[in-house]
Image: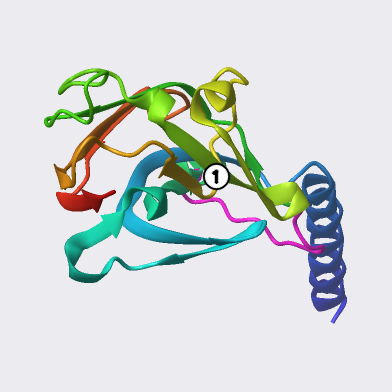
Amino acid sequence: MKKNLNLFIAGYLIFLLLSVFSCSDCSGGGGRYSVTSFDVQNKKVVFDNETYSTLDIDANSVSYNEYAILIEPMMQSVAAKRAFLTTTAYACSPADPIYEDKFLDLQITSTSDYNTNFTAGTNLTSLFDVIFYEEYVSSQQRMDLETYLNTNPVISLETMLVLKTPPTNTNQFSFTVNMDIQGDDLNDFEFTTETIEITL
């Protein structure tokens, strides 16, 4: 009987210790996340005053001022990569996760001439705005893409590259985007969009 009581007390003390340490971990943040890859899609973006909505593109054709490249990062917990046989018993709710990977540079090119000033293979970054989702204020912001990159931005949970300049003619385009990244898992990432008709 005395042995069972000692085991119960020991077990209860271990539970209390785990609870204390778990709460300490929660107060320090939900842990760091790093970008492992990106999901990329062509999208139609429709603006209504200061709001917008994203839609799938019909018939593989879209007006230049409604064309957007949607970029969504795929994340992995840094702590999860280090965890093997250990688990944590949470006695409180974890805080928000921390995202620290950053865009260092971003280059956009096309295999087709966009206009007389931007021929095939030249950097088209200045022809785009960016819309990015600010997680901690739950809002979307739009700004010139080059200006945005000069801020050394943390990679957003949702980034859209939005054309703001028309091509010389309606034509088929695909865009290659090369990103330089400061992160734990990725230093660079390149993708090419599906070919789409962009109209005036």
Instruction: Residue at the far bottom: name it.
Output: 1
Residue bearing mark 1: 131
Q: Tell me the residue at 79%/51% (across/down).
A: 26
Residue 69: x and y in percent read 36, 47
Q: Tell me the residue at 86%/61% (across/down).
A: 16
Residue 55: x and y in percent read 40, 68
Q: Is 28 positioned to the left or the right of 68 in the image?
A: right
Quarter the N terminus occupies: bottom right
Q: Is 164 positioned to the left or the right of 123 in the image?
A: right
- Magenta stretch encompasses residue 85: yes
Q: Amino acid at mark 1?
A: Ile
Q: Tell me the residue at 30%/30% (across/down).
A: 189
Q: Secondary structure at mark 1?
A: strand
Residue 71: x and y in percent read 40, 47
**Magenta segment, principal secondary structure?**
loop
Whether 8 is drawn above or below 192: the answer is below
Nearest the eye: 40 or 168 = 168
Nearest the eye: 102 or 60 = 60
Q: Please rate how many residues cluster around mark 1, counting C-alpha atoms within 10 Å: few if below 14, some from 14 to 19, many from 20.
A: many
Nearest the eye: 72 or 77 = 72
Q: Which residues are magenta?
A: 83-95
Q: Tell me the residue at 29%/65% (across/down).
A: 57
Q: Is 63 positioned to the left or the right of 168 in the image?
A: right
Whether 12 is drawn above or below 181: the answer is below
Whether 69 is drawn above or below 82: the answer is below
Residue 171: x and y in percent read 14, 45
Whether 199 is drawn above or below 36: the answer is below
